[in-house]
Amino acid sequence: MGPEDGKVAARKKVRLPLRKRLSYKQARNTALLTLALGIILNTAQITYDLFNVEQQTDQLVQQVLSTARQPAAEAAYAFDQALAERVLTGLFEYRPLYHAVIYEDFGNQLAAKDRPETEGGLKWLAEILLPQEKTFSIQLVIERHHQNVGVLKVSVDRYLIALDFFRRSAIVLGVGLVWTVALALILVVVFYISLSKPFLRLTRGIAAVDARRPADLLLTVPPQHADDELGLLASTTNELLLEFDRALVERERVEARLRERETHLSGIMDNVADGIITLDEDLRVATMNRAAHQLFGYEPGQAGGQPFVSFIADEDWPRVSMELMTSLRRQGGSHSGEQRSEVQGRRRDGTVFAMAFSVSQMRLGARRTAICVIQDITQRKRSERAVRESEERLKQAVSATRSGVFDADFATGLTWWSPEFLEMLGYPGGASPWHDKPLEALLHPDDAPATMSTIERYLSGESGDYLSVFRLRKNDGSWLWIEARGLAIRDERGRPLRFTGTMTDVTDRKRFEEQLLYVSTHDPLTGLANRTLLQDRLQHAIAHGARKGTSVAVLVMDLDRFKLVNDSLGSQVGDKLLRALGQRLVSCVRAADTVGRMGADEFMVIAEDLPEPQVAARIAEAILVGLTRPFAIDGQQLFITTSIGISLFPGDASDTDALLRDAATAMDNAKAAGGNSYQFFTPRMNEEAVARLSMEHALREALDLNQFTLHYQPKIDLETLQPVGTEALIRWHHPEMGSVSPARFIPMAEENGLIVPIGEWVMRTALTQIRAWQEQGLQPLPVAVNVSVRQVSSGQFAERVRQLLQEYGVGPEFLELEITETAMMSNLAYIADTLAELRSQGISIAIDDFGTGYSSLSYLRRLPITTLKIDRSFVSEATSNTDTAAIAATIIAMGRQLGLTVVAEGIETEEQLDFLRRHQCDQLQGFFFSKPRPADDFCKTFLKPTKMHAVAS
């Protein structure tokens, strides 16, 4: 049933039967109350009327008797029976009388008269209301003699007396009943209109509310009810709906963050090649990563709650359980470290395999968890037995082929290369270039990503055949084109055990293909890309930018007054000038940019992967500056300028023709403005380019004008809470812009290459400060300096650091270099070699902001690092988010198991300190201990004199 069906059902549900409606109940209760009050009042009225009837009857009978007294007395005095009967006959004219008798003074009956009592259906009621018989008597007296002569007695018919009373009472009761019924009907209508109908409207409004978005449909009431209880109910309900909506939005936000954190944590766990299992205090499985599921043959979710004993062979369980219990009993969240042992594991299907096993403890609050790291070593043991046989077979195969042969054993990590292949690469005598470098280090930088991707896709089973063509660096530094073919030997689950194949030299073939391609895509005069290649490159750049969400700039250039040079000096000089200008243009742009000649004196530059459009302005500026230098052609100094038009994808257009047209339009505007300038197709881009160039110009001057300073923030030891090191942080104070955040100028320096001189300034300043502290007799702390990947990749970086240490006379133990993990991924192999050389000098190496990038155990093991710095984002949420806390604890555990010093950044609260203390983080850094301080302030607060200087003092 859809949402609309649900709403209709809800509306049907609020159509109540009449007897259940509030208006009916209110009217019914009011009518019943009115009826009850009417009955009470009518009863009182009837009782009062009955009393009056009795009084009136008594008075009337007395009047009748008074009228007959004198004649009756005369009859009794004279014993006149006839007169007495006439008197009684006269009395019977009064209908209520049904019995009358006259007694003479001796008590004898003189005369009597009777008639039947009146019968009727209500006589019983009259007897109830008038229970006593109505009998009246008077003394008969002769007034002239003052003598009693007898008694006159009469009896009254009670039914005749009450009959008239019954008629009046029936009218009163009937009128009251009609009034009550009419009142009830009126009240039903009134209460329905004024109460039930608004309530039903509110109820239907509530029933129509979407539980997923309660605030989308709020309740309304008629204006006449805005200030009464209905209005209050509606406003209160609306406030509740708004609060529910806010709560739902907040819950969705929290759930999204939880899913994000869970995905992040799962990503870290699943990217670890080793199997990782966490156990609770009852030694039952809490979580397993992807590798562990595959290793033990479980589907995700099946192993949760299983006793760990079912994962270990029976003969090894006592030893494993002892290690687990020992780890869980450790106090303070300590870890067991790399205590590896080899045991027999048991898969879900009951098969047993050899595995390497290590255990450590993680503590979250009062709950302790054992972390087990597991590696399958079955294939390693099998491979060790098969190595000799395999090598013998390969030697026989090599002798029958002229290509090089390789054989990679994934269990041992060893790769065998045939002597023929090593000789092909220029390594005589069987010397292998891979004894200290991975294959990726010898690949041509342009071929490395695709080549490694092809290998990985084949080994993972995504592709069925392995064929790859790439360049390898020979011993003499030249490049050799190789065509590689191979076959993987896999286990029963499809995982590769060995990878064997051939590598054939196809350099001559590739050179011929490249020559053909070059002729068809390059300008014969300048050697630059021709129009065909430029069109193709631009289409690829647009598609690439659309996928990655980056900008592409097209710079169209037309030389100013080139026709004058060509006409006056001849076409030969003009051609030489065009060739020289093409080379000059290539030197002015980035290595990834494409420079081409469109024809005559028109050139074009395609700049892709622009993080922001202003980069195009810097390229144009570099071209204009580069062309200010004269060209030496046939002994003459020639000067040439150009007009540049810039169009941007996706800002200006999304297809090649439109981009070229817009750039040509902008170029015409630049030429019309006098030439030797550039114009954006969009005026707004010009303004932004000027602002950015101004900022970049100020940054270039900052070093010369001494606008940079260093501040120092201490690193605190967890156990002693004393400073054990410090980090040097650069600050820029501009006279007009004020303090400029490093987040603004460091990325700009990275882009334009200024980060290299700025980085050297930071290192020189830090070493100068260390030397100054030593000369002051102070015991300096090791200083951590952030280095850019550009510095590390600039060539001879390790040698340059060694020279600086010697120049300032500072020992390597006082210097630590920090590099972010994301930056290292750009050229991991080269950076790893450089860091290894730095480490061999005794310099400490730290990975900064760990956890925000790849966070992989594989590259941590490859790099010669000493310190792991946890990113501040994990520290800030460790006390408020259980997922973040688990990630931070896992990073600390991994760092300790790898023997690294773990430093937590961004500590600001006591709760964060307690969390890190529980998980045995080595060092701490953050505003909780100290903000970054100038050198003098830092010295006074944290540095102590050396023992020798203290004694001398």
Image (spheres, grey):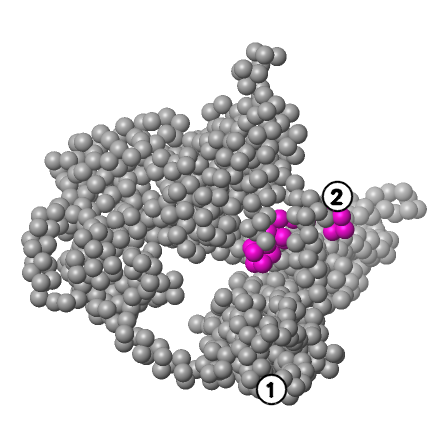
Q: Amino acid at mark 2?
A: Phe
| Residue sitting nearer the eye, 691 or 871 | 691
From the viewer's perspective, is 388 left or right of 785? left
The answer to whether mark 1 and mark 2 are in CB contact below 8 A is no
| Residue sitting nearer the eye, 160 or 566 | 566
Expressed as whole percent of the image width and height from the top left, the position of residue 179 reads: 72, 66
The C terminus lies in quadrant: top right
| Residue sitting nearer the eye, 144 or 782 | 782
Is 738 a magenta residue? yes
From the viewer's perspective, is 207 left or right of 719? right
Q: Is residue 592 visible?
A: yes
Where disc 2 sits, the SS reads loop
Can you tell which of label 1 and label 2 is closer to the viewer? 1
Which quarter of the figure has residue 627?
bottom right
Point out the residue furthest to the right here: 144
Work out whether 44 lies above or below 488. Answer: above
Q: Amino acid at mark 1?
A: Gly
Expressed as whole percent of the image width and height from the top left, the position of residue 543 reads: 47, 76
Work out whether 909 lies above or below 23. Answer: above
Where disc 1 sits, the SS reads loop
Q: Please give the label number shown on residue 106.
A: 2
What residue do we see at 68% from left, 48% from top? Answer: 704
Work out whether 416 lies above or below 287. Answer: below
The residue identified by callout 1 is: 570
Expressed as whole percent of the image width and height from the top left, the position of residue 500 reads: 17, 61
Q: Is residue 911 visible?
A: no
Point out the residue furthest to the front here: 635
What residue do we see at 63% from left, 30% from top? Answer: 938
**Stretch in magenta:** 735-753
From the viewer's perspective, is 396 left or right of 86? left
What residue do we see at 64% from left, 88% from top? Answer: 567
